[in-house]
Image (tube, coloured by chain):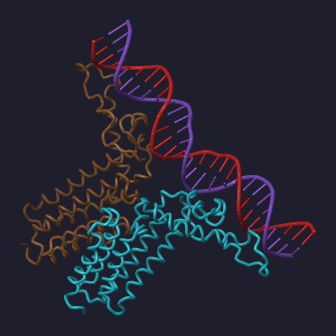
Chain colours: A brown, B cyan, C purple, D red
Amino acid sequence: MSAVNIVEKKPAAMRRKRADKPVRKAVMYGAEAQTQILDAIDELFYLEGARAVGVDAVVKRAGVNKMSLYRQFESKDALLLHYLTRRQERFWNYFGESLAKHPGKPREQLCQFFIDVAERAQRTGYRGCPFVNLAIEFPDSAHPVRRVVADNKDELMARLLALATQAGARDPQALANGMALLIEGAYTATQTYAPGHALIAAIPQVASSMIEAACGKSPA
Amino acid sequence: MSAVNIVEKKPAAMRRKRADKPVRKAVMYGAEAQTQILDAIDELFYLEGARAVGVDAVVKRAGVNKMSLYRQFESKDALLLHYLTRRQERFWNYFGESLAKHPGKPREQLCQFFIDVAERAQRTGYRGCPFVNLAIEFPDSAHPVRRVVADNKDELMARLLALATQAGARDPQALANGMALLIEGAYTATQTYAPGHALIAAIPQVASSMIEAACGKSPA
DNA sequence: AAGCACTGTTACCGATCGGTAACAAAATTG
DNA sequence: CAATTTTGTTACCGATCGGTAACAGTGCTT
C-alpha cells in the first residue's frame, strides 16, 4: 500500500486471432479482465469506500481471478489511482454538461452546476464526492491519492475563477472561493445530514444568492 | 462491529481503599484504564481514522491490556460512540466559545465561529470535522455512528437558524442553509485542498459576505 | 514439432482484524 | 479466616488483509 505505478505492467495482448476461428478460451483475456476490474472498482470503491473494499471483493465482483488482477495492476494503490482517473473524467464530464446548458452565460452556468449536483445527490446510490471521500479515508496527506485529489481541486478552483471573472463579479477570487466552499459543503452535507434533508434541495438557492450578491442583480 | 451499547459493562470499582495504606497495584485500575482508553481513541480515531485504527493500536497507545479494554467496553462500535460523545462535547464548547466573544450580537457571533474554525484549521494535527470523517468512513447510513452524526448536524442547523433569526436576516432559513453548507465546506476543504491553501484563510470573508448579503449592510 | 509467452487456478504467505477462553494474583466481601 | 469478585496476562480463535509461488493449460511464433 505504498508504491505507485499508474500504468499497467503490460499493454496486454491486443492482437486478434488470425481469422474468426472459434475462440477457445484464453487469448487476450487479460484486457477483458482489466476492463471488468476497472468497472468493479469504480462501483465498489465509490459505494463502500476504498478502505473497506478488499482485493478479494474486487476480484469476486469483477469475476476474475486474483492473479489476473495482480498481473494487470501493481498493487491496490495502483487500483486506487485508476479509480481516481476514471472518476475524474466523469466529474469533468458532469461539469462540462452543466456549462453546456447555458453557453456564453457564466452566471447561469455556475447556477446550473449546483442544480445538477443537487439533483444527482437525490439519486439512490449517491455517496458524495469520490475525491472528498478518498481524502478523508487516507489521512496521510503524503499518500499518492491525496496529490491527485488536491490537483483536481486546484483545477476546479481555476475553472471557478475563470467563470467568476466572466460573470463580471466585483471580486472574482472571492466569488470563486465562495463557490468552492459551497461545492465542498454540498458534497459533504449529502453524507452528514440525514438522507433527504431539506438542506440538499436548498443548495441551488444558496448558490444563486451568493452569485447574485457577488455580481449584482441583473444578468450581465 | 454491529451491536451497540453506549454504557460500559460495569461502572467499575470506584471505591477507595479503607485509609491511605500503600496502594499495591490493582484496585480501581479499571477506571484508570477507562480514562486512558478514552484519551487514546480521542487522539487516534481523529488523527488516523476510525477504520484505520485497530483495537491493538488503541490498547498499545492507552498502555493497557486488551482484556482490560474489553472488560470496560462492549466492542469497537462502543468505542466509536464514546469517541463521538467526547468530540461532540468539544464541538459545542468551541461553538459556545465563539458565541461568547460577542454576547447579544448574533452577526458577529456567526462570523466569529468561522474565524475560529479557520484558525483551528491552520494548526498542525487538524484533520477536519470528526463527524464528517466518521460519516464518510462508514458509508452505511444505518450504522449507529451515522445517527449520532445526523443528530449533531440537526442540532447545529437549529442553532444556526436561531442565530440567523436573531441577526435579522430577511430569510433566516436561507441564511441558516448557507451557513450550514459553508461549515461543511470549510471542514472538508481543509482536507481536500492542499495544506495551507489560501482558500482556508478566506473562509471568514466568504461567511461574512454571505451574512451581510442576507441581513443588510449595517449591523442590526 | 518445438519453444515461448501468456493464461487460469490453487494453495499459500505473514500480518492484522475484532474478540475471547482460561488462569493466577490480588482485593473485597462475609 | 475463607469465599468471592475483579484484576492482569497469555495465548489463542476464525476471518480477512494485501500479495505471491508454482504449475498446468492454451495459443502464437518459428
> Where in the figure is residue B177, as x and y percent of width and height?
29, 76
Q: Is residue B140 left or right of residue A215?
A: right
> Where in the figure is residue B131, as x and y percent of width and height?
42, 68
Residue A70 sits in which quadrant? top left
> B94 or A52: nearer the eye?
B94
> Where in the figure is residue A161, as x and y percent of width and height?
16, 66
Residue B24 sits in which quadrant? bottom right
Up-down relation of residue B202 to residue A89 (above or below):
below
Name the residue at 43% across, 40% down: A60
Up-down relation of residue A36 to residue B70 (above or below):
above
Q: Is residue A122 left or right of residue B3?
A: left
Name the residue at 23% across, 86% down: B215
> Where in the figure is residue B69, as x and y percent of width and height?
63, 63
Quadrant in which the C terminus of chain A is drawn: bottom left
Residue A125 sits in which quadrant? bottom left
Q: Is residue B126 left or right of residue B185?
A: right
Q: Is residue C4 left or right of residue C18?
A: left
